[in-house]
Amino acid sequence: MNTDTSPPARLPADPLPRHLDLLHRRWTDALGHHHFDCAVIAAGQSRPYFLDDQAPPFRANPHFQQWFPSDACEGSLLLIRPGQRPRLFFLKPDDYWHQPPELPEWAHAHFEISEHADAADVEQAALASAAGAGRHCAWISEQPVANQHSGQLNPQGLLDELHYLRACKSDFEIGCMREATRSAVLGHEAARALFESGRLVSEFELNLAYLAGAATTAGELPYASIVALNQHAGVLHYQHYDRQPPATARSFLIDAGARCNGYASDITRTYAAHLPPAPEIFHDLLKAMNAAQLDLIATIRPGLSFLELHIDMHRRLATILTDSGILRCSATSAFESGLTESFFPHGLGHLIGLQTHDVGGQQKNPAGDRQPPPENYPSLRLTRTLTPGTVVTIEPGLYFIPKLLDALKAGPQRNAVNWPALESLRPCGGIRIEDNVLITEKGTDNLTRTAFQQVQAQQ
C-alpha cells in the first residue's frame, strides 16, 4: 500500500479546474463516439515480486492519474459520467501496517467522493453506480474487475482516441512538467559538480548526488537513472552503478528525470573530463552535437512531421562526422549510404507526460491509424505531426558502440571510416543531449534549457 499521504506537490491550483473541465469534455466526446454511457477507471494495485510479500513502489494508472494527480490512490476507482461530476470511490484501509492515504482538500471541490475501508466495498459501490449510469460501461483497468457485468475492459477504440488527445497538454500539465524539469535540473547540476570536482568518483556516488540534488528517492523517479562513465555511455540503457571509480575518467553521461504530480521530465547531459583529459576530438564532438541539437530545435514548428526532424538530425550528424574527420567521405554520401545509423541507432525523441515514453507516438489520428517508422529507423517512437501543446524529447546521440563499429568494420563501407580516430573514442562511450520541448503556436518552448538557465543563475 502506498504510504504517501501528502497532497500533490506544488499543485498549480488555478489551472486545475480548467484541466479537469478539459478532461471531462474529452472523455464525454470519446465515450459518445464509441457508444459508452460511462467509464470506470481503476487506479490499480501494486504487485508483489514473485513468491514474495514485497512490491515495488506503487504507480497509478496514468488514465486515473490524469484526473487525480497523485500516487496516493491505490485500489481506488473513478466513475466518469457525461454531464455529471466524476465520482471517486476512495480506498482508505483501516490499517496499522501502512499509513493509509488521505484525501487532499482540493479533491472535494472536483469529485463526488465516498471513502471505503475495504477494496471489495470500493468495487461493489462502483459497480452499482456504473449500472445506474447506463448499460454500456468502459472499464479502464490493468486487470478485469470481478462481477464486471455489462462493462467492456479497455476498449481499443476508446483508448486510441484518449491516447491521441493526451499528447496535447493542458496548462496544469505543462506547469507540472516545468516543475519536474526544474527538480531534475537541480539533480543534474549536483551530479555535474561532483564529476567536475577534480577527484575520481564512482557512478554510485554520482547517482546519490543526483538524488540529493533533485530531492527525490529512486522510487519516485519516472525511470531508473542512467549514470554512465566512460565506455558505459555507449550502452543506451545502461543499468548499473559501479561502486568503484574508474582508473581514468574520460566522459560522463547522465540520463535522469523527475516527477511532479505524476508528470515526468527526461533529461540527458554528457560531459568530457579535463583531468586527465578525454581526447580533444571528443570535446569537439560534444560541442558540435550541442550546437546541432539547438539548431535542430530552432527549426521546429507546428505541422512538422517528427520523422522529418529525425531525418534532418541524421543529415546534421553526417556533417559532424565528416567535418571531424571520423568519416572519409562526403556528408551526403554518409547520410545516403546509412553510415550515420551505426553512430545514432535510436530515435530522436518521444512524447512525454504521464509516462516517460508517453502513448500515441505513432498514431496518425484519434481513430488509431498508425504510422510506423521506416525500416531503417525501427527504434523511432514518434512519427506523428507536431501540434501546439505537445511536449517531446529531442535527444540526438553519437555513440561508439563496439557491436555496431565491429559490424561496420567488417562491412563494405569500412574504408569510409577513420579507424584510428574511432579507436581513440571507444573508451568515451558516446554522447547524448536531451531536452524536453513544448511545441507552441509559433515554435517551441525549451523547458530544459530554461530550467538550466534559471538554476545556474541562482547558484
Image (cartoon, rainbow, N blue to C red):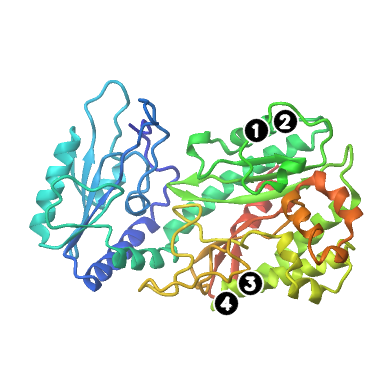
80 with respect to 170 (left or right):
left
Of the pair 107 and 144, the residue shown nearer to us: 144
Confirm or deny contact between disc 4 and disc 3 (CB under 8 A): yes
Give me the residue at 75% from left, 73% from top: 337
Q: Nearer the viewer, mark 1 or mark 4?
A: 1
Report the front residue among 234 and 437: 234
x and y, in percent, of residue 110 in the image: 26, 53
Return the residue at label 1: 241
Spatial distance from mark 1 to mark 2, Cα to Cα? 8 Å
**What residue sits 39% from the left and 56% below the top?**
14
Q: Name the residue under label 3.
A: 309
Q: What residue type is labelled 1?
A: Tyr
Residue beneath disc 4: 304
Q: Do the residues labelled 3 and 2 touch (CB within 8 Å)?
A: no
Residue drawn where x is 36% and y is 60% of the image: 19
Q: How crowded is mark 2: few (under 14 residues within 10 Å), some or many (20 or more)?
A: many
Q: Which amino acid does label 3 sit on?
A: Leu
Q: Earlier in the sequence, mark 1 or mark 2?
A: 2
Dot 1 or dot 3: first in sequence order is 1
The residue tagged 2 is 202
Is residue 275 placed above or below 77 in the rendered structure? above
Crowd band around label 3 with a 10 angstrom C-alpha radius: few (<14), some (14–19), many (20+)? some
Quarter-of-image position of residue 209: top right
Q: Do the residues labelled 1 and 2 touch (CB within 8 Å)?
A: yes
